[in-house]
Image: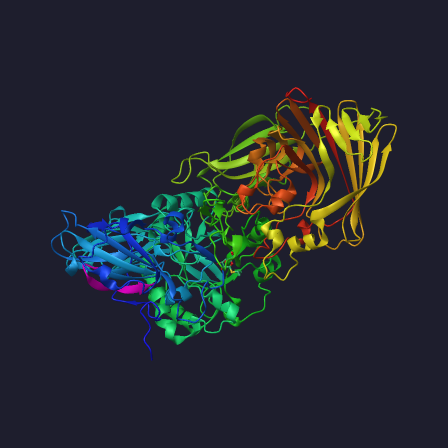
Amino acid sequence: MSTLPWYEDVSPGRGTLPPRAWYARSDAASLSLNGEWAFRLSPAADGHDDSFAAADFDASGWDGITVPGHWVLQGKDGAYGAPAYTNVVYPFPVDPPRVPSENPTGDHLRRFDLPGDWPATGGAVLRFDGVESCARVWLNGTELGEFKGSRLAHEFAVGRLLRARDNVLAVRVHQWSSGSYLEDQDQWWLPGIFRDVTLLHRPEGAPADFFVHASYDHAGGTGGLRVDCDVPGRVTVPELGLDLATGGTATVPVEPWSAEVPRLYEGELTAGGERIALRIGFRSVYVEDGVLKANGRRVLFRGVNRHEFHPERGRSLDLATMREDVELMKRHNINAVRTSHYPPHPAFLDLCDEYGLWVVDEGDLETHGFEELAWRGNPVDDARWTPALHDRAARLVERDKNHPSVVLWSLGNECGTGAGLTAMARWIRERDPSRPVHYEGDRSCADTDVYSRMYPTHAEVDEIGRRADEGPEARRGLPLVLCEYAHAMGNGPGGLSEYQRLFETHERCQGGFVWEWIDHGLVHPEYGYGYGGDFGEELHDGNFVCDGLLFPDRTPSPGLLEYKKVIEPVRIAAGEEPGTVSVTNGHDVADLAHLAFTWSFRADGEDLAEGLLEVPALPAGRSAAVRLPEPPAHPAGAETVWTVRAVLARATAWAPAGHEIAWGQITAAAPAAAPRTPAGARPARAADRITLGPGVFDARTGEPLAFGAVAVTGLRLDVWRAPTDNDEGAPWQPDVRYGTLWRTLGLHRMRHRTDEVRVGPDSLTVRSRVAPAGRDLGLAATYRWTSDGTALGLDVDVVPEGEWTVPLPRLGVRLGLPGTLDRVAWYGGGPGEAYPDTRAAARLGRWESTVAGLQTPYVRPQENGARIDTRWLELSGGTDGVRVAGDPAFWFTARRWTTEQLDAAAHGTDLVPGDVLWLHLDHAQHGIGSQSCGPGVLPVHRLSAAPASFSFTFTFTASGGQSA
Ligand code: IPT
């Protein structure tokens, strides 16, 4: 048998220490080896021999590189290769465990002195927190060993090799190794030493490891504490008056840890000459009666899947960025994270303990690319790989076992099924019986304690929730967790409210984790943010890597704002009795004492009064009806609305006092009358023009050319929108993919035939037929214009003709106005975009923006920016102003490019504002859904072609002032 080089054999490594708990604080000395290292890149694994590892090697001619970091993101003008994105497919021939000869290899060198106060006795370990995809390590010319497992910690004992001055650490990293077959996660391939490198002093006899067992008994309100350690020592928790020997058990009254109330107790472990700081959270998590419970109560995951990502630094995250992620999650009502699909930087888990997030900690394991090969050769079902799998399970559990935030161990993602997974689960259950095991890829649930699914339809979630699903016995009694649902790619995800309703209806449905937290758009010299294919990859999956609730720069997307509203832990709705509001505490454990409630009263969007609302500190799960004040005096016939908000009463670690947690709006009175249609003025025809009040029309086509001083162009019925990623749909979706279907039908190239331009005594009527070439279906559209001499009224009637079996993207009119109209004010839903199934976060009010500010910068441009329920809209700028009122309320979108330009754009940089402002006034929009990966638009949110009538009233100013 030929022997493979170490990086190709299936072993996890050689020479490393057994895995152990990671901790941030102890009194033992440590030295960060982060910083500038010398670096040399070779195109192949054997491009250079090992001589660089010799203690006297002269690397003065090498370049510098920053550790931690990925070399492909650090070379000038691509000098160090480029990032590459594939979702499922391996970017190299599948011939496990062999890898290509073209195997970019980075040699890293770092010289260091020990600090002057480094203890003279004891040992030391060298720790690598993450290296992709493998490393071979030498210190002072002596080889320490090698390891695989990119997102796992590895340590070497180095005490005997250290010297006071001029130590030389040499690390050889190959981009590809046998480990790459186990790391086929949906993300960029980014080689390098991307997490910290640290030298840790180990006092003589220091503990090899310790395990904090801190449980909570909700019946008695007591915590149980036992700290196991391989060397005898003592554990103190001053706040609890505890001082006990390692291995001993104490039971004391405590406050439990939860994501909502993350109570931590500071403690200390003293053993073998080392004092290690402990942060102890008492909590118990288990499945009971088919329900996943923490501290005796059902948990509801309002979660996200989090990849580690930074638009410039890839997966190399600093503490500030991790903290930003956690704070953003907390501020958006998120209470859970799945660390998809590998253990995160360990400091992230410290933050989860501290701020309060339930964590599904996932192993660094995915073999998804074997699915394309009908799972032939899948490593998780091949005994030769079992030691590597076992190593990954152990490195996950041992490193992270002392975090109260970690409540489920996840074996990995998308690996199919196999005995290797069973071996991992068995080992984990034995090592840590205190946490249930998660894995989605095996529907038999033989190795898991929860039934996990990704992207099921609402109907299926409902069925599982009713326990009406068929299936293997092993999973019948298990709680349902959606490890992934609602694909946040581009505009969307739609349908979140409907999922949440199911989670709140069925005890068995314990919420889930939206896919995913952040768009992985990498800063690109030309495109702003680049995605798959933008870095010259021969195989890639395009913008499927941009599917997060945050934009790459961590600006919340409309999807995150929607999610925040959908998962708000307090529900505020109209009470049964008029004049009351119903408040429901949807927290898992917290009462409402940490919140203050406010009310405001608005008439036609105008704030008339506001105040504080007394709401009892309801316990979790309880509702109360609260009486609202007497409505303040307001104009007769106005639309009046109460807005009740729940805000933080006091500042927390993650948000200031006053930060909004939840809100609800209650209509007090609907508007008394519909807006009046302008009437009375007579149209006049002169040569090739027709005038009607302030309107000037082309006599031949009936198209408006000017509204008073405001030039108008291209007003016509419009059904097209630049398909969203969810419209386009994923190739594996069995459902219809509308983007393709709409284009096949020709909805993006509708033709407009003028059938009649009729001047009546008090109106101008234009009949037209709107239809695509080559098809016998279309829409008859009638535009009827009226005026009172000042305002213009437009009534639009639409009647579908022919067999319409597909929904329309949108239905409305679009028109071009001067691009100088750049300020926008409206009364309607806002402040952000909304679509039929992404409208929970839109609240009724008066809003203002600029045209630029209305745009949502999806990394791949697509339909965006619609504002819902608009009663009226004003556009102003320069000397002109236009006001549009709608009956019924309408959607509007305004942009300085056409839908066709938006549709053609691949990156934000393709969108250049033109001279015309394209205003869309829509009667309806098709829903968004989640079909870029999951299910499509729910039937109620489909826009079926059907007869429709809608009206607008236009008024104008030519002075730049407010219109009447
Ligand atoms: C699922 C993956 O688990 C996840 O990593 C990501 O790729 C997501 O899809 C889509 O962005 S797998 C999918 C084929 C259902």
Residue 212 placed where, x, y %?
29, 57
Colouring scheme applied when the structure was drawn: rainbow
Residue 42 vs 789, above or below: the answer is below
Which region shows up in magenta?
139-148
Residue that extends furthest to the right in the rendered view of this protein? 761
User: What is the quadrant of the C terminus in the image?
Assistant: top right
User: What is the quadrant of the N terminus in the image?
Assistant: bottom left
Residue found at x 86% / y 34% = 758
Residue 929 placed where, x, y %?
61, 52
Residue that extends furthest to the left in the rendered view of this protein? 120
Of 927 and 166, the residue lying toward us: 166
Q: Magenta stretch: residue 883 in it? A: no
Whether residue 673 is visible to the viewer of this picture, yes or no, is: no
Left or right of 157? Residue 500 is right
Residue found at x 27% / y 58% = 171
Whether residue 59 is visible to the viewer of this picture, yes or no, is: yes
Of 283 and 893, the residue lying toward us: 893
Residue 237 placed where, x, y %?
25, 50
Residue 566 placed where, x, y %?
55, 46
Which secondary structure is most common in the magenta stretch?
Answer: strand
Left or right of 467? Residue 652 is left
Residue 51 vs 580, above or below: the answer is below
Q: Quadrant of residue 609?
A: top right
Residue that extends furthest to the bottom in the rendered view of this protein? 1
| Figure label count | 0
